[in-house]
Image (cartoon, rainbow, N blue to C red):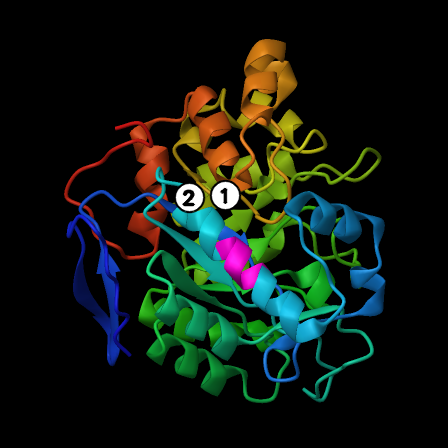
Amino acid sequence: MLHDFSWPDQRFRTISLCSGCMIAYHAAMIVDCHVHVSADTPEHGFLSPRVRDSLLFRFMRWRLGLTWEDGAAAEGDVAAKLAATIAGTEQLDAAVILAFDAVYDSDGRFDRERTHFYVTNDYVAELAAKHPKMLFGASVNPYRQNSLAELDRCVSRGAVLLKWLPITQNFSPADQECLPLYEVLAHHNLPLLSHTGWEQMLPTLNKHVADPALLAPALERGVTVIAAHCGTRSKLGETDFVPQFMRMAQEHERFYGDTAALNLPTRSYAYESILKNEEVRRKLVHGSDWPVISLPPLSRLGLRASLRLLGEKNWIRRDVLAKRELGFDADYWNRAATLLRLPQSSSRSPDG
């Protein structure tokens, strides 16, 4: 499938990444590798009442100016808000929009009762084809009956990575069912973006699969792994997996971590260790986790800078600006493009 990218300054062109798959790239492309979208129509996906009525989700809707009286209208409003937010973030060249597969039972059947958030691959692929700054991030639960065929289909539609949230999708990255998908990912050189640590927006179905060490089988089979959130806690009292993340980042060449949601007060504690360690710092990848709010880390930026950044109403742009002030270098800003196979001949930072 050919993505019709219409970049106004004509700095982009298309290249072939795989059979039947084309994508645009920039010589020094800055990509947000972790952006969500929601769906609420039968053909595109759904949210469970538990998620839709949760305090966190209602707060997010209010702050973004979104209503949810009608599923189809709400879905369109979210997509429009996302497109406008990305377009208004001039520091970014593109963002990976993530599909989100359902929960499946041990026989590979769709488990509607335990699925709280579902966004189909086709919907996200359609958004990516329609909006020039969106890239398609696929999601395939390894327990679904047709997982290998679905992953191949997503690759043919231009997917740039595979997204998992095991504690919500109810499987372990170390399960035997994951191994065939790892072979396909390695064959296509498609990165795996897998949530590590804890989660607040969505219900936890399996609290035993938050450890980044469970991703070792993927690394052993040649998969490039991006550990979302670097193994951080989502609230006090939870197990902190940042030490495990750091150890794996130093021991495995293909193991990285994204900074999605690290500006939240409950996760920003990780900056102290991951930014101080030069080897780990070279493994960090830019991600925002929109529509999760980005709050400038007060303890690192100070009150004046934090208040100034809070004046930025575009949350994706605010996340970029806060991380720029944290001192991330050009390699950080360009790393996602490298891992997603979007070639770059030079590098730049959001202010250059």
* The image quarter in which residue 347 lies: top left
Can residue 33 be seen here? The reply is no
Residue 39 is situated, as x and y percent measured from the top left of the image, at 63, 70
- Amino acid on which the number 1 mark rests in the picture: Gly
Residue 11 is one of the magenta-drawn residues: no
Disc 1 secondary structure class: strand
> Which mark identifies residue 257?
1
Which residue is pictured at 43% across the width and 30% down the height? 281
Residue 80 is one of the magenta-drawn residues: yes
* The image quarter in which residue 241 lies: top right
Q: Residues within 10 Å of mark 1 (few under 14, many from 20)?
A: many
Residue 185 is situated, as x and y percent measured from the top left of the image, at 41, 69
Q: From which residue to which does the magenta span run? A: 78-82
Q: Residues within 10 Å of mark 2 (few under 14, many from 20)?
A: few
> Which mark identifies residue 88?
2
Horizontal side of 19 relative to 96 (left or right) equals left
Front residue (pair 328, 171)? 328
- Give the prevailing secondary structure in the magenta stretch: helix
